[in-house]
Amino acid sequence: MEALLVNYVEKSLEQYMRRNAVFLCERLYAEFPSEVNLQLLARCYLNNNQPHSAYYILKGMQMAQSRYLFAIACLEMDLFCEAEAALLPVPNGAAVQYLLGIIYRDTDRKNKSIEHFRKTLSIDPMFWAAYEQLCMLGEAEEAAVCFGDATVPCVQEHYLGNASSCLQIADTDHSSDSSQRFGLEYLSRSDLKQREGNNIRVMCENNHGGPILTGAVRQSKNSCCSTSFLSTPSPVPTQLSDVAPPPLVRNIHLRQSEDSLRPNTQARGKFACDNESAQIRGSLFFDSGLRRSARLAVGHRSLNTSQGSENKAKSLHASTKLSSETCSSTFYQGKLMETYEVAVSEFGATSSSLSSTTDVKSIQHEIENTKLSSFISDSATIKSGISNTMKLLRTLGEGYRHLCMFRCKEALNVYQKLSSKQYNTGWILSQVGKAYFELVDYLNADYAFSLARQISPYNLEEMDVYSTVLYHLKQDMKLKYLAQEMILVDRFAPQTWCAIGNCYSLQKDHESALKSFQRAVQLNSRFAYAHTLSGHEYVIMEDYGKGVECYQTSLHVDARHYNSWYGLGMIYLCQEKFEFAEHHFRQAYQINPLSSVIMYYLGTTLEVLKRSEEALEMMETAIVIDNKNPLPKYSKAKLLLTLGKLNEALEILEELKECTPRESCIYALMGEIYKRNKKYDKAMLHFGIALDLKPSIVDVAKIEAAIEKLIIPDEMEESL
């Protein structure tokens, strides 16, 4: 009865029938109350989004896996102290180190967090989430170090370890009488699973990105990837299907008539995706030619030598090759069994037991040699595959690291080195869009994000940034459609409510926008961007006190969120607290030293503080960083006017006038320069043009006052 219930619980988890798994596992534990069954029940609760239930049933348990599952439940409930206490006695596998890093990060122990994330990568170089966290903290080493050639042997060891386990599992498929006849040790699947206990499963829906453990006697079948406490997960796929899976990468040329494509799985919503061909033009991509989707097809292997060798030649991936060789080993062993039976029947029953034993040993030796040779023959292919995988991670890691350091142009150059299959994916295109957003190139950002939406309409990552892009572009209709589609995908995602808030803010409904951003904070209190957007809305509503609170909360969550430092600087600049403004702008500048907007406001603050030389240097740097931004050029012209360098200021304004001919402030400043050069006719002309461009009321008053003083000589003006 216990084995039956366990089997059905695992099957229910595999099929995502979570409520059924919980019910059956509760019956299992009631009938057979053991800590192993309690762990399985906790897994069911965690899969069914019931961390509180898992917390209470595991509290006080001492087995390593029970403590690990208890820590996962604590993290879901933000009980960081209890999670840390539960994890410390657990053997230090990669997943345990990663979770400790998350705990230390969320409890403001940055140095220890960095230490544990680095330990995670040293144990398992393919633990991408740890490198991602290091990039976010601004402490990641170069990708060539973390994913370099030196890490290949470590990954290969994990890979081959899993491969040998697969071979052992294949050996257990023979009948018990055959194993007895050949004197081979028979290892049942349950015994094998007992030996392979204490595995870790990465939860796909875990907000903390943390894995959970499977049962101590059972290996989870529905996990994304598994690893033991003492060893890290292997990249070997645990399941291979006879039917080709849907392609994970949809090319730009979406094709509707291909039979191999299946509809994309969508979380909590449906989308009607247009799969007709669409040729993409523009300078966003380095290669816009026709690309074919990569397909992984695993065919049936028949039990004959010719078909086996043919399928072996057609294997596409190292994991498929390994599975094929496992089948070949089983086939050769079966053929040797048949050969032995024929030999025994020919020699008759008079054969001595000694000779039979000798034949069995020789056959056994031949079987082992066959398995070993097939295993070794794939080792070179496996090593090549691992090397290619690490090369891919190296490129992705370097691009992501540049982006987290706000070296956006370098990140774009790195991403363009990817193959078309990898580049044309939702995650990469979202990163490209974010890079263009940081470069204040909103048109290209919109283009990249829209392509990401076409490829992965179910993915909401970075879509909050896309909504901000549309906000800056004043694309009201596109922003509304984006918000509606995100609601259909997941109305409980904080990114969705950020998009809704930006939509309301664009419509000048700041009260509703603020409620939307606060809803995003309720859904995920550690979503720093939602706190920042709330602060922006308070600033628009001139509630500076609450704006400061929102920005400070955002910085408590993520100290490198430069937008909040910038927001605090703007508040203090408006309040004329210039020293405070300089401090916060400088903090933002240290995090993102390539933002011309931050440089402009820092230079403006320095100008107000009468530090003109420093301000001029900052404006010149901003112009070098972004020559298209007119604000630093205008401020530089003002500073040159203050320093008495009239001709240089006039040259900059003449250039600026060609780029932005509708800005009244440019003509007003040119009029002031001509006035100081005593060219009153030109001064009057430019003051008149400035008034015709309908400036603000304050600027109108200043321009009219300057016109009145044109007829008064400078000497008289100074005496007055």
Image (cartoon, rainbow, N blue to C red):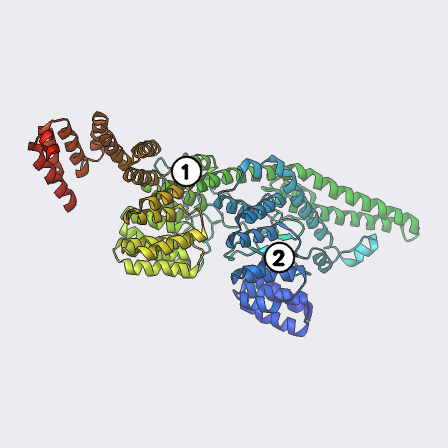
Nearer the N terminus, badge 2 or badge 1? 2
Which of pointers 2 and 1 indicates the residue nearer the eye? 2
Residue at image location 74% in from the left, 44% down from the top: 371
| Closer to the camera in the image, 400 or 157 | 400
Badge 1 marks a residue whose secondary structure is helix
Quarter of image, res 222: bottom right
Nearest the eye: 307 or 109: 109
Q: Quadrant of residue 499?
A: bottom left
Measured as percent of width and height from the top left, residue 386 is found at 60, 39
Classify 10 Å Cα crowding around label 1: few (below 14), some (14-19), many (20 and above).
Answer: many
In the rendered structure, the answer to whether residue 222 lies left or right of residue 619 reads right
Q: Which mark is residue 662?
A: none
What residue does disc 1 label?
Answer: 408
Horizontal side of 664 relative to 440 (left or right) equals left
Residue 123 picture location, percent across and down: 63, 45
Q: Which residue is mark 2?
A: 87
Left/right placement of residue 665 relative to residue 233 reads left
Q: Is residue 665 left or right of residue 396?
A: left
Residue 277 in view (yes/no): no
If the image is split into quadrants, where does the N terminus sit? bottom right
How many neighbours does mark 2 have within 10 angstroms: few (below 14), some (14-19), or many (20 or more)? many
Answer above or below: position of 502 versus 13: above
What's the residue at 72%, 51% (across, down)? 168
| Percent of width and height locating residue 512 | 30, 60
Assess whether mark 1 and mark 2 are in contact (beta carbons under 8 angstroms): no
Looking at the picture, does residue 220 appear above or below residue 334?
below
Q: CA distance from mark 2 to mark 1?
A: 38 Å
Element under label 2?
helix
Q: Amino acid at mark 1?
A: Cys
* 283 lies above or below 176: above
Residue beneath the point at 14% across and 41% down: 702
Quadrant including the C terminus: top left
